[in-house]
Amino acid sequence: MDNISLNALLVALVILLLLSAFFSGAETSMMAVNRYRLRHQAKSGQRGARLAEALLARTDQLLAVILLGNNLINAAAATLVTVITLRVLGESELALTIATLGVTFLILVFSEVTPKVLAAAHADRVAPWVSFPLTLLTRVLSPVVWFINLFVRGLIALLRIRLPDASSANRMGIEELRTLLAESGQFLRPTHHSILLNLFELEKISVEDVMHPRSQIEAIDMELDDAE
């Protein structure tokens, strides 16, 4: 790298930090996206949502691609920061210390915390967009991902950990549905919201609670005239 100018190294460092930020934000948005809203968007014909659903169906492949790319880029960024620091300050223990602290700060602030906070706040909008490059990377890196997951699955099997399938992991129980509906009251009309909430109480209601004995029912013969 001695023949590469300092400006070129700085530009390369910025590019690496941006790529690392992309992977960090992509990971957070894909894991934090609302699966039910994503499914609705996919059924509505949004291509990005369909791709995101396909990626989330194989979380092991998705995480392998994201973490592989992010770790390679962070390693390259750390090397580049060290080269830049040594070129500016010379070879010394102080320079190495500054390089270590500098790359930690840069990656933590610009490539980890900030993009993850933003992606978590806008996961439903970010996930369909990042699914396009992630789908391409998944196809290109499929041999490497398969090799990595081979060891991952072996380790999980060795630890005797049973992973739930995607359908059961996303299935909601009655109490979870009740909580979800209770929190969505601001998006529904009060009458509709009350009706939906009352549906959960049907199992607690017996026939005696809603029926009246025939002797207590007041009836009028419909064939009687007004005078009668």
Image: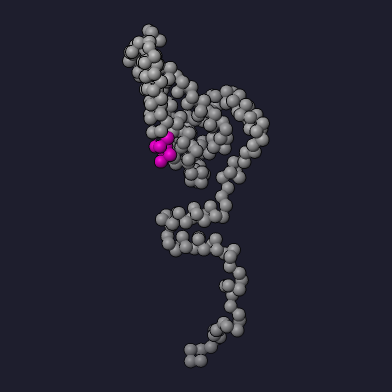
Image location (x, y in percent) of residue 100: 41, 20
**Quadrant (top left/top right/bottom left/bottom right) for the N terminus:** top left
Residue, x 46% and y 36% (percent of image)?
28
How does the figure colour the protein chain or chains? one colour
Magenta span includes 118: yes
Image location (x, y in percent) of residue 5: 34, 11
Q: Is residue 209 visible?
A: yes
Q: In the picture shown, does residue 194 fall above or below 129?
A: below
Residue, x 61% and y 69% (percent of image)?
206
| Residue in front for this viewpoint, 120 or 107 | 107
Residue, x 45% and y 31% (percent of image)?
24
Q: Is residue 44 visible?
A: no
Residue, x 62% and y 38% (percent of image)?
163
Looking at the rendered structure, the number of numbered marks drawn on it comes to 0
Q: Which residues are magenta?
A: 116-122
Quadrant of res 7: top left
Image location (x, y in percent) of residue 125: 42, 40
Magenta stretch: helix, strand or loop mostly: helix
Q: In the picture shown, does residue 14 fall above or below 29?
A: above
Quadrant of res 54: top right
| Residue in front for this viewpoint, 219 or 222 | 219
Q: In the picture shown, does residue 102 fall above or below 51?
A: above
Q: In the picture shown, does residue 170 fall above or below 79?
A: below
User: Among all residues in the image, which is located at the extreme front?
Assistant: 93
